[in-house]
Image (tube, rainbow, N blue to C red):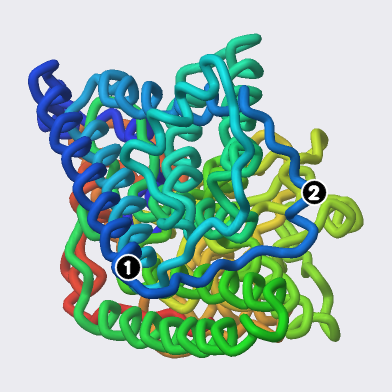
Amino acid sequence: MSGNGARTDASAWPHDAAAAAARPATFALKCVLLAGMGLVFFSTYGFANWLAGRHAQVPSFAFGWEHAIPFWPWTIVPYWSIDLLYALSFFLWRWRHELLDHVKRLLTVQVISVVCFIAWPLRFSFERPAAGGMSGALFTLLAGFDKPFNQAPSLHIGLLVVLWAVYALYARGAWRWLLHGWFALIGISVLTTYQHHLIDVPTGAAVGCFALFLFPLRRGVGPSRSRAADQPIAPAVLAHARRIARRYAALAVVFLIAACVAIPHSPFAALLLGWIALAVLCVAIVYWRVDAALYQKNEAGGFAWATAALFLPTVIGMFVNSRAWTFRHAASSPLGHSVLVGRTPTRREARLARATAIVDLTAEMPGWARRDPTIRYVCVPQLDLLPPTLAQLQQAVAAIERLREQGHTVLVCCALGYSRSALTVAAWLAAHLHLDDAQAALALLREARPQVMLRAPGVALLQRYIDWRVQMRQEVVREAGHDGSHETPDEAPRDTPHGARGEAPHLEARHDETPRDPRPGPEVRP
């Protein structure tokens, strides 16, 4: 799909243009980038160590119970193994864009971690016991360039998170379990080698997840597609998205300040508030870039594990918010024709509604009922508070009709069931009943769900969609008259994903441009 519901993996876009744009990653390029990143790693890490060593006193942060953590000298082996895994990771990629994204992820972890080392230097405060044999030799080698500084966030853990996600793409079967076991051992080793205190682990993991959020893993021929890459964004839509982004960014700053204030009083509260701040900041970035693909919600309604961890605070908040706004109203409302409209359902709510299929329009929450084996699940993710593209709208309408034709009772849902789902169901009603007026479709919808909140911009988008379908029907009539076809004009747009002929240029048009319709770009009120 295009627009703010773009998928994150390139394999979803088997376009000739994307294939032509793909460039293989040469062995020479891999070697050059590995050498460059090695230079960046050792120079910046060493510089931060040197700066910390110049301080008269460097504080430490450790819980008293951490003295009970055992020292296991042999875990220096998995600890060191990340260096080999780091180097080999450059040679896993077939395509240049994949390799460059990998470098961006590693560089993001490096830069954020080193900046934190310089801004808030910390030291490891426990005395490490002596170790002999090969373990002792590896500890001696480590001490040759590493100092007891550069603690939080743990650069080791941040890189581990990124590399873990990368290698997991390639491991299958028993090798996958072996991989997870070894990487988990690397994570434990930062504590059992007495290299890091506990506080360094979650902060390092957060940095790694943030890098995976900024530069999602993507496999395939061409670069991943996003809303910005697919089409221009109407100025009014972009301005509205930036306003939303600034509000979320301001809220993130508030939580960050609260986290800093909480540090001397409750480290746990500080970590929790910092987690919330990071999650809210990521939402701000999603809106600033106007790209729902950054949520990395897949067709099955789940998130990539890194973004699932990153967005957990906002997912909880948005779920609670959706229930707070809708608890006085029905979770879903039947429209007839085997279609319902409502909020994103839990598995229990979906069964109570007797839905056998779900069309989920949310990008910010997982599909709660997606694991129910009795329910067919389709996801067309769109950003809340922003209008969908005509392509997204038609994709969702086509999904509804396809599921109905398969005999399903379809629940179309968004966070509240008042806006995104309402617009989509109104568009489906207009297409299914061959209506040529947006107000007529909305009147039918409001009879079933009076709480629908669709103001003038949303109505304008709905009318543009209806006008497009009318235009397609007229073209079918003209073509049928020339070739003697008996196909009815009303069936062609309904039975094909994007209408009859030439649908892609129409549906990929700007928000503020559609053929024969100069009306301004739409905005959908939540």
Q: Amino acid at mark 1?
A: Ile
Q: Earlier in the sequence, mark 2 or mark 1?
A: 2
Residue 31 coordinates in the image, percent (x, y): 14, 23
| Residue 173 visible to an observer of this rendering | yes
Pair 2/1: label in front: 2
Residue 100 coordinates in the image, percent (x, y): 20, 38
In this view, 154 is above or below 161: below
Near mark 1 (Cα within 10 A), the count class, few <14, some 14-19 or many ≥20, is some
- Say which of 142 and 92 sits in front: 142
Identify the residue under disc 1.
118
| Residue 469 visible to an observer of this rendering | no
Near mark 2 (Cα within 10 A), the count class, few <14, some 14-19 or many ≥20, is few
Residue 260 coordinates in the image, percent (x, y): 54, 84
Residue 262 coordinates in the image, percent (x, y): 64, 85
408 to the left or right of 161 = right
Instruction: Tell me the CA gap for discs 2 and 1.
Output: 29 Å
Callout 1 secondary element: helix
In this view, 460 is above or below 231: below
Identify the residue under disc 2.
68
16 to the left or right of 113 = left
Callout 2 secondary element: helix
115 to the left or right of 198 = left
Instruction: Locate residue 162: give its quadrant.
Output: top left
